[in-house]
Every structure is written in structure tokens, then in C-alpha cells.
Amino acid sequence: MLGRYLNKIRLLLRDEGLVAGSKKTFLGLWAVLRHAGSGDVLFISSGAVGDSWRYRVKNVAEELNFHGISASITIQENLWLDLYVRNFKVFIFHRVPYSANIASFIDKIKECGGEIIFETDDLTFDFECVKQQDFYKNLNETEKKFFENGLGAEILNDPYVKTCTTTTSFLADKLREKGKEVFIVRNKLSAEDLKLAKDIINKKYEAHSEVRIGYFSGSASHNRDFETVIEPLYMIMEKYPEVELYVAGYLEFTNKLNTFRDRIKKLSFVPRKEHFFNVARMDINIAPLEIGNPFCEAKSELKFFEAGILRVPTIATATRTFREAIEDGVDGFVASGTEEWCEKLDKLVADREFRENMGDNARQKAIKAYSTEGEINKEYYAYLKSKIDRK
């Protein structure tokens, strides 16, 4: 367990730099020492940083608390873990690698008759899928060991575990194949996110004549995703000299877009508040994904509603998830293939009023459907309350 934690610190310092990495290391140490108290539901996660933790642990706990279910969060290395068995009634495991310590904790939950829920926001529990992904191939041997059986697959495959939560209908179907009852709990923006977005869009920004297209990649694993839109971006940038491309992340340009390198702006990774400011500066947000890759099909629609809450319209690859989330032509666009990407990019670049109206619609969708305060998971709340009340 100590080796795993030290490896996480090493990766944080490598990826985030000394200052940001040290801050996150301190937060991680605090998560190890902090007592989670007591309540109805306890989320156990592999860590206390990153978007996956934010959306699947922190924000879902906030949502449950908003709706009358007392939820707390902790991490698997927490010093008080075994004590929580009698302090909570429902235990939700998010991206937790299996270990002797976790096996012992689960046995104690079973002895007390506690409810165990397996939570996932991607296909990392399926090793056959994971080993095909670029991110896995780039891991060192120590890092690969966390995935060798599928991340948390031992928990998922335990007959005692009858229920799962996840982010998308695609993932829900994969989990139902294992005979589980599945609740789709969409990623949602926190109350803090909503306030931040409102403050940002109420500010006066200096007008700009260029049309800014933003791509916020998130990690080095998105190179193949971006490759799917190189051709349409090239065609649009060739047609419209006022178009600028802003790219956040590790993406490297060794393709034909280098022709427009003076109109391509690189953005570094920044804290969440600054990230929201960067997104708000865009006129168009793009969310391309690699076609035919089940890992991409499993991705949630967070790139749509993170931009939408800031009144920025999104064009996304027409995966099942984005087709379900976006009303095409109203609050966003979904696109398949170069021709459709070109057509829809062209429409947004050429028509400022149209894209601003689409951005307004996207913001309304984000507020209504992607807020932790919204009551859109009533069936899930009722299920949890049934497990809590019977104890």
C-alpha cells in the first residue's frame, strides 16, 4: 500500500510540477489521515484528486447530501478504514484496486450486512479492453500491475455485490452483462462549479475578432481522438483565416495543421478555476473521439456540459453518449466523419448569432440536467434509502 501511495506522489510531481504536485500530495496525505465520521453512504476511492474523483465521488456525495442522504468520502489508504464498517450502511467503491487490505475490509462489511456498490466511469475493470489502449502501453510495470485483473474487477465479480453505478448507458449495458442491477448516475457540476461559471459569464471580456476553437484534451491518451478531426480543422482553418485553434494538454502537432502554427495556441494544464476561464474564452468547443474504440464509447458527456455551463457550444463525435446528451442543432452538434465535421464547424464559424444561441441553449441544458442540486436520480435515491432504512 505504501509503495502504491509513493508511486502516486511520484507521478503527481512528474505531471503537475513541484508546486501543484506538492499541493495535491498534501491533500492526498490529508485524505489518508482524515476521519470520515458516520452517516448513510461512504464512498471509497483510490485517490482524492483528479476529474474522476471529483465527478464520481465528491460531486455524487454532494448530490446525495442535497437529497437527504448523508454521504461521506474517504480513500482506500485511510487509517480509519476498518472503523467505518459500523458507521455507514452503504459502501460505494470507486476505482479501488483490489488488495489484502480491501479484501479484509469487504469481509467485515459482509459480516455486518452492509450494502456494497461497484462504481465505475470507464472500462478499466475490463483488462482485455485496457491492454489495447495507448495509455496502458505507456505505463511502467508497476503501474500496469494495478490493471492486470481489471481495476477493481474482483469487487465487481463478487456475487455479494449485486448493484453498480456508472456514467453512461454504454457502460450500464456492459455491467448488466455481468448480471448486475445498474443505475446510471450522470456526471454533474457541483454548486461551486455553477457559482464559478455564473461569475465568469457575468464578467465583461474584451471583444475579439478571431473565432476561437478550443480542444481540451485532458491527457496524453487523446492523440488518436484528435487525429479524427485534423482534416476538417485543416479545411476550416484554410477557408477562414480568422479561425484560431487553442489546445490544452499534451497534444503534439506533427501533422498538416503545422501549416497554421502561428494560429495554434497551446494552453498548459491549470487549476479548475483557470480551466473554466480558458473554456469561457472559446467560441466553439470540440470533443472528438476515436471511432470504434469501446473505451471512447464509454466516455461521458462532461466536455459538453463543462463548456455548456459557460455558454460555449460543442461539436462532439456522435458516440451513443453524445447523441443521448446533445439535441443536435439546438444545444450542440454531433458529427460523424470529415464531411459532417466540416459542415457543422462551418455553420458555427460563419454564424455568430447561431453559435451564441446554441451556447445559451447548452447552458440551460447544463443547469437543468447536469447539476448536483437537480432531482433527476429519484430511482437511485429511493434504492439507497431502501438499503439504509432496512438496517
Image (cartoon, grey):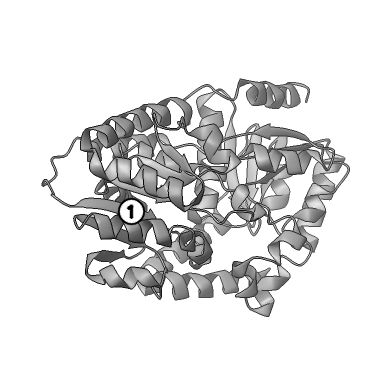
* Residue that protrudes farthest toward the bottom in the picture: 141
Front-most of residues 317 and 202: 317
Which quarter of the image is occupied by the C terminus?
A: top right
Residue 49 horizontal/vertical position (percent): 50, 56
User: 223 left or right of 139?
Assistant: left
Front-most of residues 260 and 194: 260
User: 160 left or right of 287?
Assistant: right
Q: Residue at x 44, y 57 (%)?
A: 229
Front-most of residues 303 and 234: 234
Q: Which residue is mark 1?
A: 214
Q: Quadrant of residue 169?
A: top right
User: 119 left or right of 100?
Assistant: left
Q: Is residue 126 visible?
A: yes
Residue 120 horizontal/vertical position (percent): 66, 47
Vertical order, 310 against 68 (above or below): below
Which quarter of the image is occupied by the N terminus?
A: bottom right
Vertical order, 251 against 124 (above or below): below
Q: Quadrant of residue 133?
A: bottom right
User: 180 left or right of 8?
Assistant: right
Q: Secondary structure at mark 1?
A: strand
Residue 279 horizontal/vertical position (percent): 31, 49
Q: Residue at x 88, y 43 (%)?
A: 159
Front-most of residues 338 and 261: 338
Q: How many marks?
A: 1
Q: Is residue 150 visible?
A: no
Residue flagged by tag 1: what amino acid is it? Gly
Q: Residues within 10 Å of mark 1 (few under 14, many from 20)?
A: many
Residue 13 horizontal/vertical position (percent): 45, 73
Q: Residue at x 32, y 72 (%)?
A: 258
